[in-house]
Every structure is written in C-alpha cells, then in structure tokens.
Amino acid sequence: MNFSRQALLGIGMIIGGSVMLYAMVQQIGDSNKPEPVSAMIDKPITEQPSQQPLTTDIETEKRILAQKQKERAARVAEQERRAQQFLTEQEAAETQALAKARAESQQYLASSKPSTDDKNSEEQQEAAKNTLETPTAQTSNDSSTTQTDNDTSVRDQQKAVQAQQEAQRQAAIKEQAAAKKLADSKKEAEAKKQAEAQASIEKKKVAAEAAKKEPPKSPSDHQVKRGDGLIKLARQYNMPVEVLAQANNLSPSTSLRLGQTLTIPSRQQVDRLAREAAAAEKAREEKRQTEEALAKKSADAKREAQQKLSEARKEVKETDAKGSFGVQVALANDQSKADELAKQFQSAGYQVKTSPTSRGVRVIVGPERGKVAALALKDKINSDPKVNTTSAWVLYWR
C-alpha cells in the first residue's frame, strides 16, 4: 500500500511537471510568431516617417535581429535547463520509488509473504514506467514542433533515462531473485536441520524403547491378559517367539488362555535357548539337505534303472530263453496281505499279479519278455522309493 501511494504521488508530480513544460513550450512558440500588421501600424498611413539614411536602417535591422537571436538562444537555453531539471526530478522520483520497492521487496522476503506480492510490485513498477514514458513522449513530440535541435536533444536524454530505468529494473529483478533464492536455501537448510534433529530424537527414542524391552536379568512370571499372545509377548520382552515357546514347552502357534502363567526366561536363558534353537535349525537344515541328496540319488538310480530296462526291452532277441519272466517282490502270508501289497505296487505304476503257493501268496511284477529285461526291471524296483523294497528277484513266469 505504501508503494502504491508513493507511485501515485510520483506519477502525479511527473504529469504536473509535464503539463507545465508543455505550457512553457507553447508560450515560447507563440512569442516567436510575427506580430500582426495592425499592431505594427500605430499611425495613419497618410503620415510619412522621417527620412533616415539607408545605412542606419540596415544597422538597426541587424541589431534587432541579433537581439532577437540572443533572446531566442536565451529562451532555448532556459527551456533546455528546465527540461534537464524536469528529467533530473523525474529520475530522482523514479530512483526513490525503486529504492522503496526494493525495501518493500526485502521486507516481503523477510516475512515470507506469497510471491504474488512481488509480481504485483513488478506490475505496478511497469505501469509507473509506462505512465512515465507517456508524458515524456508527449513532451518530446510537442518540443519537436517548436524546434528540431531541442527535440533531438530531449529524445536522446529520454532514451538515456529509459535505458537507465530498464537497467535499474533488471537489477531490481535480479536482486529480488537472488534474495528469494537465498531465502529458499535458508528454508531448505532449516528443514534439513529439523529433519536431522527429529531423526536423532527418533533414534534415541528407539534405543530407549529397546533398552526397556531387554529380557529380565532373572526369570519371571507373566499372567496372560486379554489380547496377549506369544508373538506380542515376545516383542514386549525382545526375544524370539520360538525361544519363549520353548521356555514354556509350547508350540509357537499355540493360543494362550486368559489367566495362564508363562515363564519369561532371563537374558542368559534367552541366549542359551537361542543357541540351541540355532543348532536345532542347523541340524534340521543338514537333515533336509541329506534327505534331498538321498532323494536325488534315488531318483537318479530310478531313472538309470528305467533307462536300462528300456534298453533291455529293445535288445531282447529270439535266441533268449523261451517264455516270459517276472519279478517276485513279496511272499504274503494270505491273500488279503498280497492284495494290499499289489495295490501299493500298482499305485507306483507297475503291473502286478498274485499267485498262491504252498508257502504263501506270491506278489509278482511283470511279465517281461526275456531274462535281461526282467533283471533290469528288478533293479528298477529295488531302487524305487515309492515301493520301498530291496528283496525283489527274477523268476520264470511260464
């Protein structure tokens, strides 16, 4: 608001000075016009002036002409002086307005007002500049009608003033941008500092909470309340769920009863149980790896036996032993036991038949054409983990 009042006051002063200058120029122009003939004739035409020598008239005309030239030069000098004074006052007013605009801009940046104020200030400066340019241009145009030399001088001075105003405006804009950038950098540094302080506080808080959650130095009891569970209590006392469950002979997935009493192990017990749990986990992992290796080995053996069986079936010749061969896999005590074993082998993908004998019921897989193929089938059965047998042997089918 202060800047707007100062700008309007300066504009008013400039417009008033322009009007006064324009009136003076018009007055000077009117004084240079020739006087009417009627004003020059004071006496009747019938009166004849006294005769004077011709040389006296020429000298008088020269003197009058020289006097008029001097007066004209004085008027022109006075006009230039007043124009220069006006331009000086105008420049001082603009400088004062620009200084106030800079002060208000700095005050705005210090108080962190929205950037729209700067934009409005620039628009007001631009409007003031345009307003200042208009009367100056009018003054220049009016002066050009009176005297060409004076008009050229005024235009040059106006261009210089305009160039200086533009340079000052650009400098003010750059100064405002630099001040805004500095303020933004300060805000960013302050925000970063606050974030680091907050992170430090959070870190200390987490460390304090971790210290509070340390397991007790000696074993203690905890009575289960509503909402308690092994996972929640393990987090509360900062210990693994498995350790808390192992200390109470429970499964980690066991649901707790309301009012149930749990033993909270001490720090040493937690470390010991954690080591035991790690050792048990390591043993389970080794066992799993061993089982996987055995399963892989068994699968490789089964695949190899199947490949040998396929090759043996292809290599069967007419010269092989006459008849078919089978692989006896078991000798059951009764037919029901034999049927049960037969279902097991059938589910593994084998063709199975049973044959009663005086010593029991035979369970036979096959038949195979040729003894070589029957031997390969026996090796496959003995290496198959699905049937879990190692006592298969080849017999003559018929």
Image: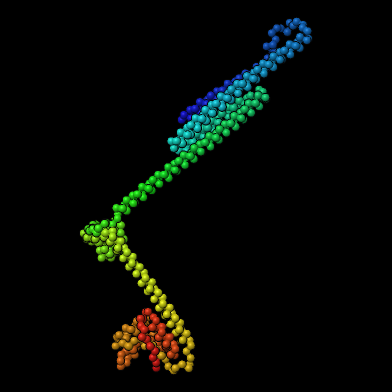
Q: Residue at x 44, y 43 (%)?
A: 189
Q: Position of residue 349 (x, y in %)?
A: 39, 81
Mark count:
0
Q: Position of residue 359 (x, y in %)?
A: 30, 92
Q: Is residue 119 visible?
A: no
Q: Residue at x 32, y 85 (%)?
A: 339
Colouring rule applied to residues: rainbow
Task: Give the residue at the far left of this rendering.
Answer: 259
Please identify the quadrant where the C terminus is shown: bottom left
Q: Is residue 75 visible?
A: yes
Nearest the viewer among 246 and 377 is: 246
Q: Residue at x 42, y 80 (%)?
A: 301
The quarter holding residue 35 reads top right
The quarter holding residue 136 reads top right
Nearest the viewer among 18 and 94 is: 94
Nearest the viewer among 235 and 1 is: 235
Q: Position of residue 76 (x, y in %)?
A: 65, 20
Q: Residue at x 77, y 7 (%)?
A: 52
The quarter holding residue 164 reads top right
In the image, residue 88 sits, relative to residue 42, either above or below, namely below
Viewed as shown, does residue 104 lie left or right of 276? right
Viewed as shown, does residue 324 lie left or right of 209? right
